Image (cartoon, rainbow, N blue to C red):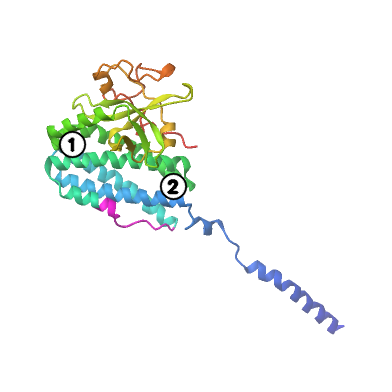
């Protein structure tokens, strides 16, 4: 009887052992997958955002030391302050998510910084403010894309919250640029630009991937300096349906033989842009030359007042629009 009882007990222990072993094996948790396994887009965004912050902080410090214009100095100080905050926020997020962020500038940004370091006075002011327009145009596109298409919820929210600040920076840089551009470039450069923009009229504009974005219908000029600020593209629809005009930052364009190439601009971004609308205060090459058809896009032509635009530039509906799009 005792022997039978012992055998029964042994059998119970034997069959219970696997269950006990399984109970003691830790199962994967969400915390394991949250760290170090971000989507490639999210990692690319974090890396580029961190690089942008580093460049802005270092370039802003140079502006504080080397700029001649007090407003440029003040702008540089503002960039140091704002981008230090976003840099600290990104570093804190990276630590939580086990992300590795760059700790020094890449060769492209280092070359830009070295070039700025070698400029003095008015030349520095002009080069710095022009660089700020380009840098913040890129940053706005980067953060807008992340806000719309990011996979990681925290990084997506970070992009959404930071985007309005970057759009404000871009607007400030564009407003400040004409004030220092003429001093740094001189009258000869202004004359050269005038000849260049005349030749640009009517040319096809392509993205860096070779896809056509539209053709140059008009060029918006700064009311005071007369310098080009935006290029108006005709976006041809099918049988007039979907045709519209949009505005690109002039400084994103470069001539390549008989055509014009837009840097950092994609066909999808152009498609999403709101239609450009002239108002009575808009100064443009087409208007200056007496082209009364400037701005017309068939039945969609609209020369009435803008909503929330900058009258000197003619619109707030270009790629650097300060109206953030709602993330999808």
Residue 122 point in image, percent of width and height: 13, 39
Q: What residue appears at the point 31 percent right and 40 percent down from the top-left corner?
A: 136
User: Residue 248, located in which quarter of the rendered image?
Assistant: top left
Q: What residue appears at the point 80 percent right and 81 percent down from the top-left corner?
A: 6
Q: Dot 2 surroundings within 10 Å: few (below 14), some, or many (20 or more)? A: many
User: Residue 263, located in which quarter of the rendered image?
Assistant: top left
Q: What residue appears at the point 15 percent right and 38 percent down from the top-left corner?
A: 70
Residue beneath label 1, please? 71
The answer to which of 117 and 258 lies nearer the viewer is 258
Start-end of magenta stretch: 98-110
Helix, strand or loop at mark 2: helix
Residue 289 point in image, percent of width and height: 24, 19
| Sequence-first disc among 2 and 1 | 1
Residue 80 seen by the camera? yes
User: Residue 322, located in which quarter of the rendered image?
Assistant: top left
Residue 165 as seen in the image, left or right of residue 188 = right
Residue 288 point in image, percent of width and height: 24, 19
Q: Are marks 2 and 1 in contact (CB under 8 Å)?
A: no
The answer to which of 43 and 9 lies nearer the viewer is 43
In the orientation shown, which residue stands out farthest toward the bottom? 3
Helix, strand or loop at mark 1: helix
Q: What residue appears at the point 38 percent right and 43 percent down from the top-left corner?
A: 142
Residue beneath label 2, please? 155
Image quadrant holding the N terminus, namely bottom right
Residue 169 seen by the camera? no
Residue 190 as seen in the image, left or right of residue 284 = left
The answer to which of 6 and 15 lies nearer the viewer is 15
In the orientation shown, which residue stands out farthest toward the front? 258
C-alpha gap between disc 2 and disc 1: 33 Å
Magenta-drawn stretch, dominant element (helix, strand or loop): loop
């Amino acid at each position: 009887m005792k022997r039978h009882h012992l055998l029964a007990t042994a059998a119970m222990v034997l069959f219970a052992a696997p269950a006990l072993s399984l109970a003691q094996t830790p199962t994967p948790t969400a915390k394991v997958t949250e760290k170090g396994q971000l989507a490639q887009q999210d990692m690319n965004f974090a890396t580029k955002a961190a690089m942008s912050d580093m460049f802005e902080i270092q370039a802003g410090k140079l502006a504080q030391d080397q700029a001649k214009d007090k407003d440029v100095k003040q702008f540089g100080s503002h960039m140091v302050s704002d981008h230090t905050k976003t840099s600290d926020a990104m570093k804190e997020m990276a630590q939580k998510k086990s992300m590795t962020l760059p700790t020094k500038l890449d060769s492209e940004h280092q070359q830009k910084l070295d070039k700025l370091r070698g400029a003095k006075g008015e030349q520095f002011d002009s080069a710095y403010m022009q660089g700020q327009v380009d840098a913040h145009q890129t940053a706005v596109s980067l953060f807008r894309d992340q806000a719309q298409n990011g996979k990681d919820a925290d990084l997506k929210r970070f992009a959404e919250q930071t985007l309005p600040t970057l759009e404000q920076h871009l607007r400030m840089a564009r407003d400040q640029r004409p004030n220092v551009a003429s001093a740094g470039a001189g009258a000869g450069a202004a004359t050269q630009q005038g000849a260049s923009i005349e030749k640009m009229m009517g040319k096809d504009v392509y993205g860096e991937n070779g896809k056509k974005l539209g053709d140059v219908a008009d060029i918006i000029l700064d009311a005071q300096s007369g310098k080009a600020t935006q290029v108006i593209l005709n976006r041809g629809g099918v049988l007039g349906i979907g045709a519209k005009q949009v505005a690109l930052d002039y400084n994103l364009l470069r001539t390549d033989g008989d055509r014009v190439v837009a840097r950092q601009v994609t066909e999808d971004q152009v498609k999403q842009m709101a239609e450009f609308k002239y108002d009575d205060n808009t100064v443009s090459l087409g208007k200056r030359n007496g082209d009364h058809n400037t701005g017309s896009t068939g039945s969609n032509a609209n020369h009435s007042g803008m909503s929330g635009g900058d009258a000197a530039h003619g619109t707030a509906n270009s790629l650097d629009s300060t109206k953030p799009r709602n993330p999808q």
